[in-house]
Image: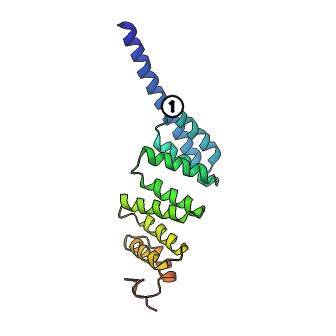
Amino acid sequence: MKKLILISTFVFASLFVFSQNAKEFYNMANDKLDKGKYKEAIKDYDKAIELDKLFAEAYYNRAVAKNSIKDYPGAIADYDKAIELKPENVLAYNNRGLVKKTLKDYDGAYADYSKAIELKPDYAVAYFNRGNIKVLQEQPEKGCEDFNKALELGQNRALEYISKYCRSKNQAAGTGQSE
């Protein structure tokens, strides 16, 4: 019985140390990410993830770092894992959409922005980004709907896009613009 208690205590203590070390690597990586040292940050995120395979935030931040060095496939893979672990992560959907937009996967980007909006209906940035996708897909009238919603939610940058792409009263609802 003493052996069982000793083994149980050791296992519990080991798990605690691994989690603590994962968090320490994660914090070091975040400092490097903030300083623009993306490759160094990725190495620390790798260590954090190696110690805690379920560390969703580490996958998310590693994706941000990978995107910053233009490792787009790596960024998407990490956003995928972050979403798998925390399906309610609105920022992961939005940021994965940005990467997909960069890769000209407009349908994929649109789906990610739509999911972000589904999870957080007042997420102005996702409406703005989804509007951009519709403009890129040569459907500015659908983009205008999202730009107007983004503006309504406080994304003032949308006004520039409304002025540029929404020429009729119907498209620029509430902006006072007409043809």
Hey, which quadrant is residue 114 in on the image?
bottom left
Mark 1 residue element:
helix
Viewer-side residue, 65 vs 35: 65
Q: Is residue 62 above or below residue 126?
A: above
Q: Residue furthest bottom?
A: 179
Q: Residue at x 54, y 45 (%)?
A: 30
Q: Quadrant of the N terminus?
A: top left
Which residue: 56% across, 45% down? 31
Residue positioned 40% across, 83% down in the render? 175
Q: Is residue 170 above or below residue 80?
A: below
Q: Give the residue type that dot 1 points to.
A: Asn
Horizontal and vertical percent position of residue 177: 43, 88
Give the crowd class for mark 1: few <14, some 14-19, many >=20 residues within 10 Å: some
Q: Residue 123: where, in percent of width, then height? A: 39, 63
Q: What residue is at 46 percent from the left and 43 percent from the top?
A: 56
Report x, y in % for residue 143.
Answer: 46, 75
Q: Is residue 118 visible?
A: yes
Q: Residue furthest top?
A: 2
Residue 64 position in % (x across, y down): 55, 51
On the image, numbered disc 1 is attached to which residue? 21
Q: Is residue 37 visible?
A: no
Colouring mode (rainbow / by chain / secondary structure / one colour): rainbow
